[in-house]
Amino acid sequence: MFRSLARLKPYAGRYRGRITFGIALFLVARLFEGSIPYFLKVGIDSITSGEGQILLPVAAIVVAVSLRFVTVSWARIAVRRSAYLLACDLRRDLYEHLQVMGPRFFGQYSIGDMMTRAIADISLIQRLISHGTTLLVIMVFATVVGFGYMLYLSPMLTLLILPPLPFVFVYTLRASRQMGLASRQVQDRLSDLGAHVQENLSGIRTIQAMVQEDIEIKRFERTNQGYADAFYRHARITSLMSAVMPSMAALCSVTILGVGGIMVLDGDISIGDFTAFFLYVNMVVQPFRVAGMVVNMFQRAAVASDRLFEVFGRPPEIPDAPQEGIPAHIRGDLEIRGLSFTYDKATTPALADISLAIARGESISVMGRVGSGKSTLLKQLVRIHDPEPGTVLIDGHDVRDYPLAQLRAQVALVPQDPFLFGEPLRDNLTYDDPTRRLDRIWMAAESADLKETIESMPEQMETVVGERGITLSGGQKQRATLARGLIRHSPVLILDDCFSSVDTETEEHILAELKRLRSGQTTIIVSHRVSTARHSDRIVVLDEGRILEVGTHKELLEAGGFYAELERIQREGADEADFQAAAATAAGAGG
Amino acid sequence: MDSAGAAKAGRAGQTQADKLRNYRRDYSMFDADLSGNVLNFRLLARLLKWLVPYRVQFVQSAVLVLITSTLAVLLPIIISIVVIDHIVRGDVPETAMDLGMIDLTEWFMATTGLPPLGAACVLYALVQLLWAITGHYHRMTLVTAVINGLRDLRRDLFAHLETRPSQFYDRVAVGRVMTRVTNDVEALYELLRGMGSLIGELVPFFVALVVMLAISPPMTGILLLALPLMAVATHYFRAATRVLFRQTRQTVSAMNQNLQENLSGLQVVQISQRESYNHDRYMKINRRNLELETKSMKLSTLYTAFTDSMASVAMGAILWYGGGEVIQGHMRLGEMILFTHFINMLFHPVVILGEQLNILFRAMASGERIFQALDWDEKIHEPARPVTLPPRLEGEVEFRHLDFRYDFDVPVLRDVSFTIEPGEKLAIVGPTGSGKSTLIKLLGRFYDFDDNQIYLDGIDLNHIHTRDLRRRIGVVLQDFHIFSGTIFDNIALGNENVDRVRAVEAARTVNAHGFISALPDGYDTVLSERGQNLSQGQRQLLAFARVLAADPEILILDEATASIDTETELLIQDALRKLTAGRTSILIAHRLQTIQEADRVLVLQDGAVAEIGTHDELLAREGLYYTLHSLQFQETT
């Protein structure tokens, strides 16, 4: 546990002064707090002795309270502020670190998992420092100061109240562990409940169509009861704890009552001492009560720390190590030499011995079945997956030798999944460079056949899309990401299956635009449609990670291989025919 | 005859009135954050309805809390009055506020022969033990009643939502409805639990107050002076932090959203070199969050230190005023010390009350949302006297001049008339928004429509109870919903007539048996949430098996648009052929093959029937269908 927490040292080190100062101040505050029962005792003794001198102790109490108020507030603020600063640093570093991770990392960890680490784990560490440390310090100081005052008043009575304390400690440890388990169960049952309702309501139409309402309601009752039971168990443990703990502590009170009473009668201690003892016992028992909570906090924070540093321990997936003598501008000659690639845990290679030269200005279509390695191949060009050294060359230099930022700026990839951020369209279209002029953005939108769509939106370019804004159709999303790629005018443009949800007529328009905009520049298009591919200079057909066919539309038709077969099937429209899209077009044209 | 006619007329009237209401329904209410910032007693009164069945427990709990509180007050009395005043100082008149503890101690001494201090110790231990027991039972009876009441409320809410009609779910987000059942009911748990702990604090407060007033009204008055002070401090603290908390929550959720989006779109971020720009934006929110957190932390630190200090100040006050009284002989020393023991009992409820107030407000808003959902009475109207359907229908479906609109002004279907013969296979095609899915939803009576428009075997659909109707119509929608449970459960769907043999036979017929038996547990394989362990095609086949096992007279299919690999596609087409054989079928078709295999094709456009006929007839007519069809083959020329 301590080794896990020690990893946080460099983070805590930055705020060492603040934390040390806070802890020292806590001790001072405790001393003031402990003096209050003492002054009460002085007052009471003064009353019983008949001196009647109470103004002085009262004044002392007021002074002590004020000083305690100042010191304890200051101490707490110092420590808690450090905790927040540290959490802020951790978040920054985690964000930074996750940004250099790639598909390998995210194949292993889900985004949800990373969100939990960023939210829950960091807040556990923050709470450990802001509350756990404080509690620990208070515990130690309260015990030391409390026992100090008691020993001063009566060593004998102090020793006699010790025996129950270890039992209180052991009990709280056990009880808080039970409570932790019980509250986790409550959480689990609650998320079961949420999942159940969510699942049910999303399928409500099927449920009603199949007349399953009654059965589903019965099934819900079980989940509902499961939560109620977990809640009951948790409540029982909590209630027992708040009954047992004071009762155990009461053993100390009974001792003071009996033994202390005898000592008062014998004149060994005063009534003031007797009264102060009750107050001090409270002071030293309190820490034992929360001990379990503190141990729990430390344990959970240790796990959280391990989970965070597991991420920090991962090196960046794509090393950025630019070499000397790389030209600042990519011209667009690509060469792939014997490229092979196997995914982690996969048994068969995704790419096997691919060799292909693409000249500057060429337009290439890549075709092949799902899983034939098309996307994998293209991702090597911008180093989303890192190719072996010497296998992918741009203008005669290894891609790995380019500065990563330059490579990705000049070789623009439009990925298969049309991802839009929950931001205005304008920012989405010019994602790589938020400072671009508006007319440039409109031009790109027009090339992607998106101009009319945007013009019909309430706030045009400022329309927020995504979950919190307008939901775009699959085709609109694809065209938006296409515009995002076109706007960059990069020497190499790679479109990974960007037309699958776009109807054929729009596609024709965009392809014509591409031809116009990208003459003399290298363009690679992945597609499933022969109608797309036929316009390219050359067509590359991949199958099981290997190049099956390369050639022009005509050459490949004559070869009578995979491409020719695909052409025949699509012509007959038996497969992949998108009747719906055609229908929509027809209706649009008709009206 | 007459009464049936009257019932019919009544029903029509009711539908009309309800239609008007539906048009006026404000579905956005479901998305809005309700205020809930006032103590709404009507709301609490409604909540009582669910708690009343557990009133016995509530009464038990109330009795127990009174006992517990009294016991809690007895403990310091034993210390101060019995031990200090009576035993040590021997200074107690008859009128002492000992609540019988002195007599009890003496009775103990007499019966057991213990010395006075020993008897006091035994008494103290006994009272403490009793306090622990009664306290525990007080809390448990209360919590049991609350848990059961809210469990019932949650079940009723779920049952209510589960039976709301399609049109409701068309307009509201599932996530919003879901939080009613989860978070909002949860807030009520919090509320009732908080009220429980508040009762546990307030009752001892009043018991202690009675004892203190009996001893010294002026000193009680001095201590009570602190309460308004604390109340004011609590009020301002809560008011200030409420704003801060809201702002903090906003920054936290902005931060999480930012991170989530950055991670989901990380590839785009990387290929656009947006890393540092995004990082800066994130840090801006992160820093703002830090400042807000610090601000509210400072406030709460000062507030806690203040309320803690009040207890010590009170101690000074007791020593100052009480000391004087004791010296002058107006009060006994033990009584003064007793006051110091009561300080916490007096001040703690104020702090707890402040904490609970926030929860209370939150819970009020939640309660409002829950009752709003429970009051949502939108429903499909059932006939007063439903027709009893014969064991087996012929399967003739007739649409007769069907007009339908969701809202006043936009007609979705206009004068739709056609008849499907028993066993006929009809494909419906048409552009998006032409009314295809509305048409099939009406056939399943997912929406209310006027009488005499749709007939099943000559019976007006509005005269058939929805449940009876839906058992005769098998629906395969685009999103195949997988129910939690095994594959077998998903095929049988609780229908007793579907046994294992029949399920396997159905699966075999629709080509699902192959992949099912390849699964580790075969038909007993438990399907995960939303059926993620099945592919699109497999889910489609499973949906077919489900329908075939139920063997409905009429089949409605909304064909999936998603592209499926060729091999599975062939299996699906084959399964569809078997499923529709001899069964009246209406298919919203997206695949050409499905259309070509249908007996007739109906082309819908703008909610009206554009063309109807066989594939060849329609092609020959060179109308809309011909255009659609030729467009499809445009590539080949």
Image: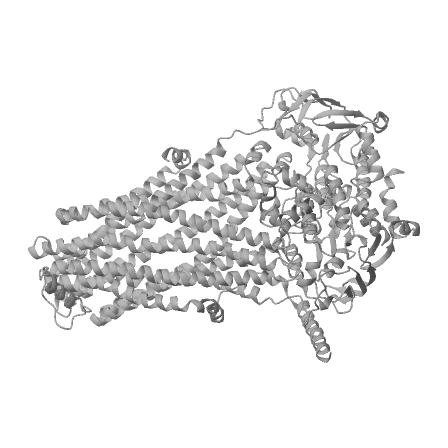
Q: Residue at x 43, y 48 (%)?
A: A184
Taking the spot 62% from the left edge, 35% from the top edge, the residue there is: B270
Residue that sits furthest to the front in the current view: B501
Residue B231 pos. (x, y %):
36, 64
Please, which residue is most extreme toward the bottom here? B2
In the rendered image, the quadrant that contains the C terminus of chain A is bottom right
Residue B10 found in image quarter: bottom right
The reply to whether residue A549 is visible in this rendering is yes
**Residue at 70% over, 30% down:** A372
Does residue B33 show up?
Answer: no
Say left or right for B242 vs B227: right
Q: Is residue B626 left or right of residue A575?
A: right
Q: Where's residue B294, x and y in %?
A: 43, 48
Q: Position of residue B359 (x, y in %)?
A: 44, 60
Instruction: Say left or right for A326 vs B86.
Output: right
Depicted B56 relative to depicted B475: above or below:
below
- Tally of numbered tags: 0
* Residue depicted at x 37% and y 49%: A179
Q: Eyeballing the image, is A547 above or below B207?
A: above
The quadrant in which residue A58 appears is bottom left
Snapshot quadrant of residue A16:
top left
> Residue A546 in the image: x percent, y percent?
71, 24
Image quadrant containing the N terminus of chain A: top left
For this rendering, which residue is in front, A161 or A94? A161
Q: Judge from the rendering whether residue A50 lies leftward or rightward of residue B595; answer left or right.
A: left
